[in-house]
């Protein structure tokens, strides 16, 4: 069974640009969560999607948004990038929303 | 508000030593889940264990064991006879109900160095 895949794995952008990251969950998993990991702030919850609906959102500005498609694939978008958005963005999927989460390898975003 | 504290930032041990990673959590919910994840140098988080708030039974899996104590809000993780391959960052996480569903909060992580 294929694991969680994230694309792209690495991304370099400049301030002010926008970026879209993609996550394909494990087949059959309907819950997808996104996290931002930085050395200073650790792992922070961004949002969770279940059956195409955002069920929960962390304390991030509106520049961070996401969506989930009918096949459970999810995208997150960050607009007007800032230097502080440089981070490893992790996606996790789970079979049910309170079950163990399986993480993808992450997308490392660098904002210059 | 939920909170997870991993007071140990870094731990260094010599191979074959036992090591315990501490995790203390705060929650107002009666239904919640606790997790441990391992993040090796490759970066991908690996699920180790899940415990729900109604199951205080300790668990052992090979060299790994977990001690869940609701009375002290702790969920500690012990590695017996550590090996170099155990070197990684270990995260404790708490998942509790939030508006619309569950929200998962991670601790800051404990970096474990196991020296040969």
Image: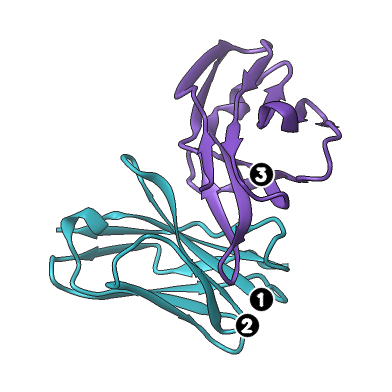
Measured in 3D between alpha carbons, the distance from the residue under mark 2 to the one under mark 1, in whole angstroms, is: 6 Å
Q: CA distance from mark 2 to mark 3?
A: 23 Å
Q: Look at chain B in the picture and name its colour.
A: purple
Q: Chain of mark 1?
A: A
Q: Which image quadrant for residue B61?
A: top right
B3 displayed left or right of A50: left
Please give the letter of the chain rendered in cyan: A
Work out whether residue B26 or residue B18 is closer to the camera in this orientation and state it: B26
Residue drawn at x 33%, y 40% as measured from the top left: A39
Q: Along the polypeptide, which appears first: circle 2 or circle 1? A: 1
**According to the image, label 1 marks what residue?**
A30
- Callout 1 crowding tier (Cα within 10 Å): few <14, some 14–19, many ≥20: many
**B22 w.r.t. A80: above or below:** above
Q: Is residue B58 left or right of residue B79?
A: right
Task: Name the spot of residue A30 as percent of width and height, x first.
Answer: 66, 76
Viewer-closest of A21 and B106 = B106
Chain at tag 2:
A
Secondary structure at badge 3 equals strand
- Point 31% across, 40% down: residue: A40
| Cα separation between marks 1 and 3 | 20 Å
Q: Which residue in the protein does label 2 denote?
A: A51
Is label 2 in contact with label 1 (beta carbons under 8 Å)? yes
Tag 2's secondary structure? loop
From the image, which quarter does the C terminus of chain B lie in? top right
- The residue where tag 3 is placed is B35
């Amino acid at each position: 069974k294929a694991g969680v895949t994230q694309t792209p794995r690495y991304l370099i952008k400049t301030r002010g640009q926008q970026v879209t990251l993609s996550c394909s969950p494990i087949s059959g998993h309907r819950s997808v969560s996104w996290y931002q990991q930085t050395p200073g702030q650790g792992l922070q919850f961004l949002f969770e999607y279940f059956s195409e609906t955002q069920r929960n959102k962390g304390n991030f500005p509106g520049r961070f948004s996401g969506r989930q498609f009918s096949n459970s694939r999810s995208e997150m978008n960050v607009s007007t990038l800032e230097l502080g958005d440089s981070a490893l963005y992790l996606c996790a999927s789970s079979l049910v929303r309170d079950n163990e989460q399986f993480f993808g390898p992450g997308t490392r975003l660098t904002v210059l | 508000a939920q909170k997870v504290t991993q007071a140990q930032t870094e731990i260094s041990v010599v191979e074959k030593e036992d090591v315990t990673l501490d995790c203390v959590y705060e929650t107002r919910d009666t239904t919640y889940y606790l997790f441990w994840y391992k993040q090796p140098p490759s970066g991908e988080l690996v699920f180790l264990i899940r415990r729900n708030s109604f199951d205080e039974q300790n668990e052992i899996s090979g060299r790994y064991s977990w001690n869940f104590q609701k009375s002290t809000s702790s969920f500690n993780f012990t590695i017996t006879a550590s090996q170099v391959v155990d070197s990684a960052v270990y995260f404790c996480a708490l998942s509790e109900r939030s508006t619309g569903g569950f929200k998962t909060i991670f601790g800051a992580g404990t970096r474990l160095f196991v020296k040969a």
